[in-house]
């Protein structure tokens, strides 16, 4: 059994395709087929079912997948343990959302750069689906996203923190609405500035409205939450956003919270890495600082 066979097996399981696995590894499809056949012969089991051009793991394949991840992690750990100890000086590539990048990562990066100035840090911004794809292709070391709790046998979940979502308004609209709790029904005739449809927290709002047989047509949609906040400060309207993104503006009186009795939602900031990727010391320190920053904001 060779390490390259194990790596190839993981990629085929990941993509559910011999051709896609071959492309990701730079092999020919025939080379991938040979490696999997050799592995199956050595293990005396069938790892994949191949039916109607679809590739799926067998029961024995599922059991071996967890072992395969452990083998790759141990090999990576062995290689790292032989590297020269001392000040961190590697490379760290993090994929994240625009909202987290703007509101939470500046403090994390500032602390990280102070502690580890020799580490080359790269930040890529995208939507969750893009970031997950980049992680699975090995293009980023970590992804830091905000969504409902996610899980995959192929991922390591390294952080999960609850995040409150709130309805916020421009100060003038907040004053017009007055104190007390409101229903969503009472707010639907107001202008909404929202993230694009199917974006993470927009999706929660749409679901809640759909449960009431209602929907909202935004006056403004944008994938950039920071842009929505800027417009919200300058024109009368409402938005539905994470607390960490609006907290400072609320404290400064530039926005106001609108209490909505039938809209109590949370999401989770989560950090993932792929199981093929060994968790380096650079990754561990970045996660530690993210955890520290998130908990500071809730204290």
Image: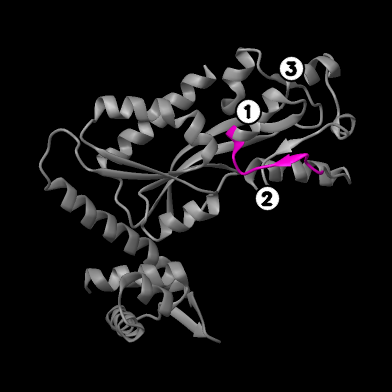
Report crowding for label 2: few under 14, some 14 to 19, many 20 or more residues within 10 A (C-alpha). Answer: few
Assess whether residue 216 is covered by the magenta stretch: no
SS at mark 2? Answer: loop
In the rendered image, the vertical position of residue 276 relative to residue 42, given as above or below: above
Compare residues 146 and 14 and report the one nearer the observer.
Answer: 146
The nearer-to-camera label among 1 and 2 is: 1
Report crowding for label 3: few under 14, some 14 to 19, many 20 or more residues within 10 A (C-alpha). Answer: many
What is the chief secondary structure element of the magenta stretch? loop
- Asked whether the beta carbons under mark 3 and mark 1 sit within 8 Å of each other, the answer is no
Spatial distance from mark 2 to mark 3, Cα to Cα?
28 Å
SS at mark 3? Answer: helix
In the rendered image, the vertical position of residue 95 relative to residue 17, given as above or below: above
User: In the drawing, what numbered circle is on residue 171?
Assistant: 3
Report crowding for label 1: few under 14, some 14 to 19, many 20 or more residues within 10 A (C-alpha). Answer: few
Spatial distance from mark 3 to mark 1, Cα to Cα?
13 Å
Residue in view at x 73 percent, y 22 percent: 170
In the rendered structure, which disc, 3 or 1, sits on the residue that comes first in sequence? 3
From which residue to which does the magenta span run?
A: 217-226
Question: Disc 2 marks which residue?
Answer: 198
Question: Disc 1 marks which residue?
Answer: 230
User: In the drawing, what numbered circle is on residue 89?
Assistant: none
């Amino acid at each position: 059994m060779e390490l390259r066979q194990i790596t190839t097996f993981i990629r085929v399981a990941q993509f559910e395709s011999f051709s896609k696995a071959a492309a990701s590894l730079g092999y020919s499809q025939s080379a991938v087929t040979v490696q999997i056949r050799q592995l199956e012969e050595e293990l005396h089991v069938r790892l994949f079912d191949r039916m109607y051009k679809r590739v799926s793991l067998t029961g024995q394949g599922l059991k071996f997948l967890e072992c395969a991840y452990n083998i790759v992690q141990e090999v990576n750990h062995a290689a790292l343990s032989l590297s020269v100890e001392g000040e961190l000086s590697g490379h760290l590539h993090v994929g994240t959302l625009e909202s987290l990048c703007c509101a939470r990562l500046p403090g994390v990066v500032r602390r990280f750069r102070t502690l580890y100035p020799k580490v080359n840090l790269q930040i890529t911004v995208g939507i969750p689906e893009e970031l997950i794809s980049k992680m699975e292709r090995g293009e980023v070391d970590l992804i830091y996203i905000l969504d409902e709790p996610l899980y995959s046998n192929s991922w390591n979940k390294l952080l999960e923190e609850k995040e409150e979502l709130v309805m916020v308004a421009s100060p003038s609209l907040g004053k017009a609405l007055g104190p007390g709790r409101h229903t969503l029904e009472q707010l639907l005739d107001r202008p909404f500035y929202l993230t694009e449809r199917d974006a993470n927290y927009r999706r929660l709002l749409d679901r809640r409205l759909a449960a009431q047989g209602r929907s909202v047509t935004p006056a403004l949609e944008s994938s950039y939450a920071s842009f929505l906040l800027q417009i919200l400060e300058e024109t009368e309207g409402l938005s539905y956003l994470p607390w960490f993104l609006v907290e400072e503006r609320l404290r400064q009186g530039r926005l106001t919270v609108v209490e909505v009795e039938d809209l109590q939602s949370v999401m989770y900031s989560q950090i993932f890495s792929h199981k093929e990727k060994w968790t380096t010391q650079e990754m561990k320190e970045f996660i530690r600082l993210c955890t520290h920053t998130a908990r500071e904001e809730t204290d």
